[in-house]
Image: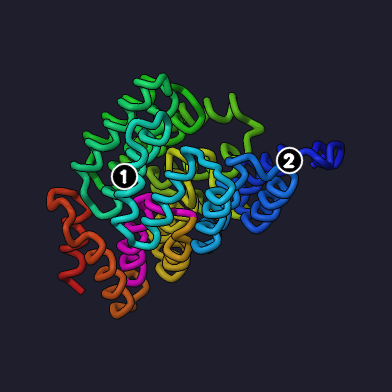
């Protein structure tokens, strides 16, 4: 980066690379290096430790992520982002008590309280507690609007619209998508709403939103290499054109492990092109190829965190193995999903489908 070369003693260029540039293309190792450089140049900025922790989390190095936060604590540095990072680490480790501790510490803190409320909604959705998740995401949006964070409120609704659509909760998905668009036409908001509507089988509105994103954000990396390929591939699937969907998704392949901007505090969008590619292979009756895509999602918990596609990938992996003719592996994948959703809301359409499909194996 020319900024860093011109001002070798400035920490901000390295922080910008670690936080907003490298993660989008999935270059987490380099992001760790850049965050460390930022800390070396300015050890008194809390956000640099957060970036170091976050990049290590994406790589699955949870101990290193915790160490970054501990180093900041020893230097008497604190930031709302730390509570969110501790919450996500605790989720990935399955430490419910630590998650609840972060929730308690965030109460009353502007920013942190709404962020964690939203991540709580994702964690609830991850395990199939759809009704509780819907209430929590509305609470997060209310907190955001109270603090004049209108864009954040819209993003929370857009993310919820996606997982509601994936669950088959059509009315709730449409409600959340419309609520998000009523609040904002930001890039992440339009993407989430469009994808949710596309997953519900619509094509006209998603296409209009995709065209608007392309026109307004033609140079944006996330839009070009994540949002648009996933959206247009979804639309192609609605038109029963799986091969076209696969061709459209080729643009996303080099950056497919990246974390678009929506994946930071809004917690959705990471590995979505991979998920849609898996669906395209299923539609094309290419079961083995589909298994590789859904396994890719399962293998990256540090990137997906509590986004419900991480849990749903197990179900879709089972469907892919069943299509490929391997009932043993299909049964294992279904069992893993049904274990994660053992206390899920019985009314969720995709949960009903999963139980019916498993019974036929």
The magenta segment is 303-321
Q: Is residue 96 left or right of residue 191?
A: left
**Colour pattern:** rainbow
Is residue 247 something one can see in this rendering?
no
Q: Nearer the viewer, mark 2 or mark 1?
A: 2
N-term mark: 2 or 1: 2
Q: Residue at x 58, y 41 (%)?
A: 46
Q: Secondary structure at mark 2?
A: loop
Is residue 238 something one can see in this rendering?
yes
- The vertical placement of 230 against 336, above or below, is above
**The N terminus lies in which quarter of the figure?**
top right
Instruction: Identify the residue under disc 2.
Output: 11
**Closer to us: 338 or 55:** 55
Q: Where in the figure is residue 116, as x and y percent of width and height?
A: 37, 41
Q: Where in the figure is residue 256, as x and y percent of width and height?
A: 56, 53
**The C terminus lies in which quarter of the figure?**
bottom left
Task: Give the number of marks.
Answer: 2
Q: Main secondary structure of the magenta part?
A: helix
**Closer to us: 300 or 273:** 300
Q: Is residue 67 left or right of residue 95?
A: right
Q: Residue at x 57, y 30 (%)?
A: 214
Instruction: Identify the residue under disc 1.
Output: 120
**Closer to us: 267 or 269:** 267
Q: CA distance from mark 2 to mark 1?
A: 33 Å
**Closer to us: 211 or 184:** 184
Q: Where in the figure is residue 359, as x and y percent of width and height?
A: 15, 70
- The vertical placement of 212 against 79, above or below, is above
């Amino acid at each position: 980066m020319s900024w860093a070369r011109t001002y070798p003693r400035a920490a901000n260029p390295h922080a910008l690379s670690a936080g907003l540039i490298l993660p989008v293309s999935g270059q987490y190792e380099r992001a760790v290096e850049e965050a460390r450089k930022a800390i070396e140049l300015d050890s008194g900025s809390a956000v640099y430790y957060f970036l170091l922790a976050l990049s290590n989390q994406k790589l699955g190095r949870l101990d290193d992520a915790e160490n970054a936060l501990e180093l900041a604590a020893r230097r008497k540095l604190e930031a709302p982002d730390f509570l969110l990072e501790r919450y996500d680490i605790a989720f990935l480790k399955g430490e419910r008590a630590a998650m609840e501790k972060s929730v308690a510490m965030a109460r009353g803190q502007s920013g942190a309280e709404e962020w964690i409320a939203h991540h709580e909604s994702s964690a609830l959705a991850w395990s199939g507690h759809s009704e509780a998740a819907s209430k929590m995401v509305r609470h997060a949006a209310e907190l955001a609007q109270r603090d004049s964070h209108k864009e954040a409120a819209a993003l929370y609704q857009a993310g919820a619209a996606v997982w509601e659509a994936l669950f088959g909760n059509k009315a709730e998905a449409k409600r959340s998508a419309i609520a998000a668009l009523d609040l904002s036409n930001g890039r992440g908001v339009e993407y989430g709403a469009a994808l949710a509507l596309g997953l519900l089988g619509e094509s006209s509105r998603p296409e209009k939103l995709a065209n608007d994103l392309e026109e307004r954000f033609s140079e944006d990396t996330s839009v070009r290499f994540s949002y648009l390929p996933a959206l247009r591939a979804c639309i192609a699937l609605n038109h029963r054109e799986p091969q076209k969907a696969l061709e459209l998704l080729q643009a996303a392949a080099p950056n497919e492990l990246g974390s678009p901007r929506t994946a930071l505090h809004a917690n959705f969008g990471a590995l979505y092109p991979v998920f849609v590619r898996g669906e395209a292979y299923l539609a094309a009756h290419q079961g083995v190829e589909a298994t590789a895509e859904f396994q890719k999602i399962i293998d990256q918990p540090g990137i997906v965190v509590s986004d419900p596609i991480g849990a749903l990938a197990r179900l879709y992996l089972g469907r892919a193995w069943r299509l490929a003719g391997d009932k043993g592996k299909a049964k294992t994948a279904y069992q893993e999903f049904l274990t994660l959703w053992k206390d899920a809301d019985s009314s969720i359409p995709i949960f009903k489908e999963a139980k019916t499909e498993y019974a036929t194996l």
